Image (cartoon, rainbow, N blue to C red):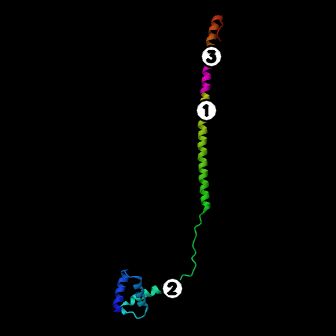
Amino acid sequence: MELANIEKLLEKYLDAETTIAEEKELKNYFSSGNVAPHLQEYETLFGYFSTSKNERFTKTIQLKTQKMNWKWLSVAASVVLLVSVYTGYQNNQQKKAEKVYAETQMAFGMLAANLNKGNIAIAKLEYFENTKNKIFKQPKK
């Protein structure tokens, strides 16, 4: 009767339906030494579980800690800083150039306006000179 019970428990164990108490009963049966011949293949399985339970790993595990490489981070930050300063400088130079260009245009506009005033005055003087020459009869040069 016990063999039939063990076979049922083994079937439940293989279907993953056993309780902890039933698994203990199987472990005790297979570690007792008098196992039925047709169940001998399961003896090594349960024997492995009982021997592996007592095994201990005694070596120390060396864990590799990942240290953040701050050198590369500082180099990258420096590059970003230099690029931003350079683009800001270029943008500033462009704004200055545009301002100088606008001021130069304004100065040339003022110069042109004053030259035009001078041209008008010279035209009036030339008219006056021609009239004076007609009156005083002086020859033209």
Name the residue located 60 percent from the left edge and 29 percent from the top edge. 106
The residue type indicated by label 2 comes to: Asn
Instruction: Identify the disc placed on residue 103.
Output: 1
Is 24 in front, or is 139?
A: 24
- In which quarter of the view is residue 42 placed? bottom left
Q: Give the range drawn in magenta.
A: 109-120
> In the rendering, at what x and y percent does residue 6 appear?
36, 89
Crowdedness near tag 1: few (<14), some (14–19) or many (≥20) residues, C-alpha within 10 Å = few
Q: Magenta: predominant secondary structure element? A: helix
- Give the mark nearest the N terminus, 2 or 1: 2
Is 43 in front, or is 77?
A: 43
> In the rendering, at what x and y percent does residue 108 appear?
61, 28
- In which quarter of the view is residue 72 placed? bottom right
Instruction: Identify the disc placed on residue 137.
Output: none
Q: Is residue 117 magenta?
A: yes
Name the residue located 63 percent from the left edge and 10 percent from the top edge. 128
Indicate the secondary structure of the residue bearing disc 3: helix
- Give the mark nearest the N terminus, 3 or 2: 2
Name the residue located 61 percent from the left edge and 26 percent from the top edge. 110
- Distance between mark 2 and mark 1 Cα atoms: 92 Å
Residue pointed to by mark 3 = 121
Residue pointed to by mark 2 = 54
Is 136 in front, or is 88?
A: 88
- Distance between mark 3 and mark 2 Cα atoms: 119 Å
Indicate the secondary structure of the residue bearing disc 2: helix
